[in-house]
Image: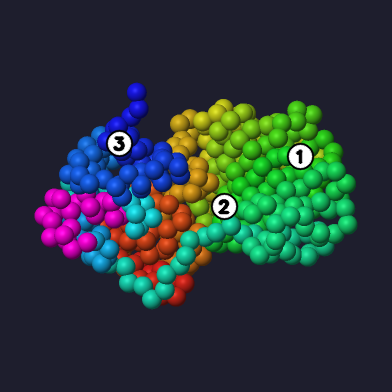
Amino acid sequence: MSQSIDDRLSDLLKLYISGSCNYEEFQELLALLKVQNDSSHIEELLQEEMLNSRYHEAELQVNWQQMVQSVLQHQEAAIPAPVRKMALGKRIAVAAAVVFIAFASITWWWLQKGNDRHTNAPAVTLTYDALPGRNGAVLTLHNGQTVLLDSASNGAMHLQPGLQVAKHDSLIAYQAAGAVNDINTLSTPRGRKFQLVLSDGTRVWLNAASSIRYPAVFTGKERVVEVTGEIYFEVAKNAAHPFIVNILSSQQGRSKGRVEVLGTHFNINAYDDEASSTVTLLEGRVKVGSRQWAEGSGQKAENANDEVILKPGEQAIAVASPLTTHYSPLTINHSPDLDQVMAWKNGYFQFERADIKTVMRQVARWYDVEIQYEGTITTDKFGGSIPRDATLSQVLHALEQSLVHFTIQGKKVIVTP
């Protein structure tokens, strides 16, 4: 039996509010919202799913009236006159649909405030709006030559004799046959992301402000690469040639750790401005060390907690020491939020009880802006998800239900109470 439109809308709203809606399902949800005539039905579905969501269980509060008034204020011109005359209760559903459509599906944001509700809605002051990041990277060859991949044409790239590299939209792919054994570096500036297929078939995704250093073709017993920032790997299986990832600081070049795999899927987050570095395993099995072993030195881990074996769904965490160049012994999170870990690769920002500085660090990397704090900043926690294809002002508008104000001046975002 085919599913009714109402049932399908309800199912899609559940997926969307839970953060598990994929791109195709989201497009279907937009289409159904556009043709839905019964606004009260949409309101009932939204309220029901909000009450059943994890945010209600955590007693996170939403100032619905302020949220709706804010949305309607910014989108008044887009709402037909008969709608503007509706009672507020009816307009909630319409405003919700407007948010889905006009604000590029920015998910509701919740501020953890116990039972308190905010009485004033701050506004984003902007003299400039930043577009979201896009596909792009810089390829640096062994001889120092650089290639800006943002503007490079698709197809074979004739870079140097013996090097076989092809560009396909958002990725470059190496071929092992006839390739020269030189070290290349692929790096993404802030506001860019890119993909790479290594000569062994390993697939690599780079988040903004990240890099990977690798040989054009792997030789020897191990396949060794070096990374900074945040990178997701799908490693081609080859039991005879383990895949080694050395994690480095982007500025100091010092080691943050080492990952050894045979074939697996995992994510590394090792930004210098984050308090900890993490390796999260999605599939397979990896050994994670908190210190890099010098190649051929035979150096072993200093103690048992310096290296761990991860199983799928586990995360290794090393916390940076503010007084030394070392990281703490590794700890294991046996149940990390995998959706949150993989949100960047799937096109979202996603937070669960994150402070404003944690949120803004990701915003700064993706929109290539500087963040400046003035006054006493709230210590309240934020939760929710926002598509990474939203503009900067749309992201900040999604946060404006909290006691935080934003002013955009050029490429600087000023955060005030």
Where residue 68 sits: x, y (%)? Answer: 21, 56
| Amino acid at the residue labelled 2 | Asn
Q: Residue 200 carries which label?
A: 1
Q: What residue type is labelled 3?
A: Ile
**Disc ID at residue 207:** 2
Image quadrant in which you'd find residue 98 = bottom left
Residue farthest top in this picture: 1
CA neighbours of label 1 inside 10 A, class few (<14), some (14 to 19), many (20+): some
The C terminus, quarter of image: bottom left
Relative to 242, say whether 384 is above or below.
below
Q: What stretch is highlighted in magenta?
A: 80-99
The image position of residue 172, as x and y in percent, is 70, 52
Q: Earlier in the sequence, mark 1 or mark 2?
A: 1
Q: Which residue is drawn at 79% across and 45% down?
A: 175
Residue drawn at x 36%, y 47% as measured from the top left: 31
Q: Distance between the residues labelled 2 and 3?
A: 37 Å
SS for tag 2?
A: loop
Determine the secondary structure under disc 1. Answer: loop
